[in-house]
Amino acid sequence: DGGITQSPKYLFRKEGQNVTLSCEQNLNHDAMYWYRQDPGQGLRLIYYSQIVNDFQKGDIAEGYSVSREKKESFPLTVTSAQKNPTAFYLCATTTGGYTGELFFGEGSRLTVL
Amino acid sequence: GESVGLHLPTLSVQEGDNSIINCAYSNSASDYFIWYKQESGKGPQFIIDIRSNMDKRQGQRVTVLLNKTVKHLSLQIAATQPGDSAVYFCAEIPNQAGTALIFGKGTTLSVSS
């Protein structure tokens, strides 16, 4: 089946630890995105990549890092520099170019203890 | 600045009623709008989209209306069902190549039997 796979679905970490969230897609889409969602809030853009080996900061990139070494994969690292990392993280893809409909993964919920 | 917002954070309706969810946007250069539905603990799913050269578009039980004069977008759901209970987001994309979608904060629709 074609789709977007995010893992893990739930993740707990201690303060001061880095954690990497995985996003894999087999839709052959060029563009991939990471959004953060807090309770009662909309989706805020962290990073996006429109092509392999290239990515741009979104509105809230501080404390996060990404890589795009393969078209299928766009992992997000939440670093210890992110002051309030507890949130629901969503990965999305689109065919690229003039962005239209986003296809979302099921999300990863990160809780910092 | 650019922003997409919704008039009401929550909306409660009875099963069978029609629902209207509203959204105001601020960027007059935006020319593509999408409504997403997000069920609890899941990623958002595409409902319907509309381009700025249209003022109405209909889908199955849903209609999106766009009023560019007052920069207002609405989603109408006919004969609302309990399965329609979710958070609904509007999203806009400014007319700039490669720009990611900007999401509003969402309206929580609760449907009671």
Image (cartoon, rainbow, N blue to C red):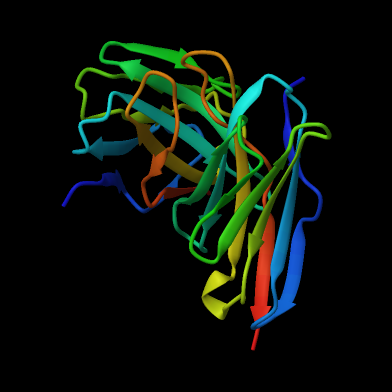
Above/below status of A56 relative to A108: above
- Residue B102: give x, y in percent of width and height: 60, 31
- Residue B66: give x, y in percent of width and height: 69, 41
Q: Is residue A47 left or right of residue A105?
A: right
Q: Could you say which is closer to the camera, residue A21 or residue B55?
A: B55
- Residue B68: give x, y in percent of width and height: 75, 32
Q: Residue at x 54, y 66 (%)?
A: B61
Q: Is residue B11 left or right of residue A74?
A: right
Above/below status of B26 relative to A21: above
Quadrant location of residue B15?
bottom right
Above/below status of B103 relative to B27: below
Residue at the limit of the structure toward the left, as seen here: A1
Q: Residue at x 49, y 32 (%)?
A: A16
Query: Considering the image in quadrants, where does the C terminus of chain B appear?
Result: bottom right
- Residue A39: give x, y in percent of width and height: 65, 52
Q: Residue at x 30, y 46 (%)?
A: A7
Q: Could you say which is closer to the camera, residue B93 or residue B65?
A: B65
Above/below status of A35 relative to B58: above
Q: Residue at x 56, y 40 (%)?
A: B50
Quadrant location of residue B5?
top right
